[in-house]
């Protein structure tokens, strides 16, 4: 009987998530809920896991996984979160500008904060921001307090963040780094020409 159970678990998606080597990054389980489906013979229980995966340097992903066991639900969610990670600009450990994101009936407002402020946020939002590497930020959740909606509203905020460089490039005004490089080249070439002449 034990061999049969091991063979069953070694097949299909369960084995794929179970045996997969975990890459580097910080995995945080935000919320685990038990679900129940009413069938003819009674109730069939399952689990839903909300997981955030971040590299601590401006890259994070969030996903939901469902399975009959908590371990498999977390593995599925982690796999999907790594697959759908989002990069956003970090400026001195905080976000570059104020922003608000919406998902469903939940809204999340974020604002840059000075060094030493810390992560001022609610449960789901805090865990995502910490996994992403944000060290100082002010935030406020508005509307529904559903963990899934708040998590996805947070991701909408992070997706919409833009650095100063991105905004200037979109407007066609990004020339600041190019001018010093152009000025530096002739300055370096001029002394070389004089040395050769001597």
Image: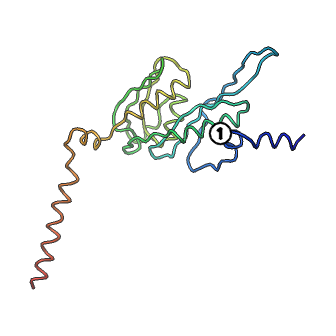
Sort mark 1 into few (<14), some (14-19) or many (20+) by Cα contacts within 10 Å.
Answer: many
Question: Which residue occupies the foreground of this view, 160 or 9?
Answer: 9
Which percent across, then down, holds residue 69?
73, 32
Q: How many marks?
A: 1
Quadrant of the snapshot with the C terminus: bottom left
Quadrant, the N terminus: top right
What residue is shown at x 57% (from left), y 45% (from top)? 26
Give the residue displayed 25% in from the left and 39% down from the top: 170
Q: Is residue 41 left or right of residue 131?
A: right
Looking at this view, is 8 or 177 the one in front?
Answer: 8
Find residue 157 and report its image quarter.
top left
**From the viewer's perspective, is residue 75 above or below residue 64?**
below
Q: Quadrant of residue 193?
A: bottom left
Q: Secondary structure at mark 1?
A: helix
Residue 4 picture location, percent across and down: 86, 41
Q: Residue furthest front?
A: 12
Q: Residue furthest bottom?
A: 198
- For label 1, the residue is 75
């Amino acid at each position: 009987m034990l061999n049969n159970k091991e063979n069953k678990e070694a097949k299909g998606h369960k084995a794929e998530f179970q045996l997969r080597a975990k890459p580097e990054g910080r995995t945080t389980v935000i919320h685990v809920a038990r679900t129940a489906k009413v069938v003819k013979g009674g109730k069939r229980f399952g689990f839903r896991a909300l997981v955030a995966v971040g590299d601590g340097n401006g890259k994070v992903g969030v996903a939901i996984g469902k399975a009959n066991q908590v371990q498999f639900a977390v593995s599925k969610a982690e796999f999907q979160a790594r697959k759908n990670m989002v990069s956003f600009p970090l400026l001195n450990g905080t976000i570059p500008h104020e922003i608000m994101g919406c998902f469903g009936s939940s809204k999340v407002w974020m604002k840059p904060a000075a060094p030493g402020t810390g992560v001022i946020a609610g449960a789901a939002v805090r865990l995502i921001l910490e996994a992403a590497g944000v060290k100082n930020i002010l935030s406020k959740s508005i509307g529904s307090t559903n963990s899934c909606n708040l998590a996805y509203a947070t991701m909408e905020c992070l997706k919409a963040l833009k650095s100063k460089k991105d905004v200037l490039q979109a407007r066609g005004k990004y020339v600041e780094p190019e001018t010093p490089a152009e000025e530096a080249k002739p300055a370096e070439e001029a002394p070389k020409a004089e040395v050769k002449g001597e």
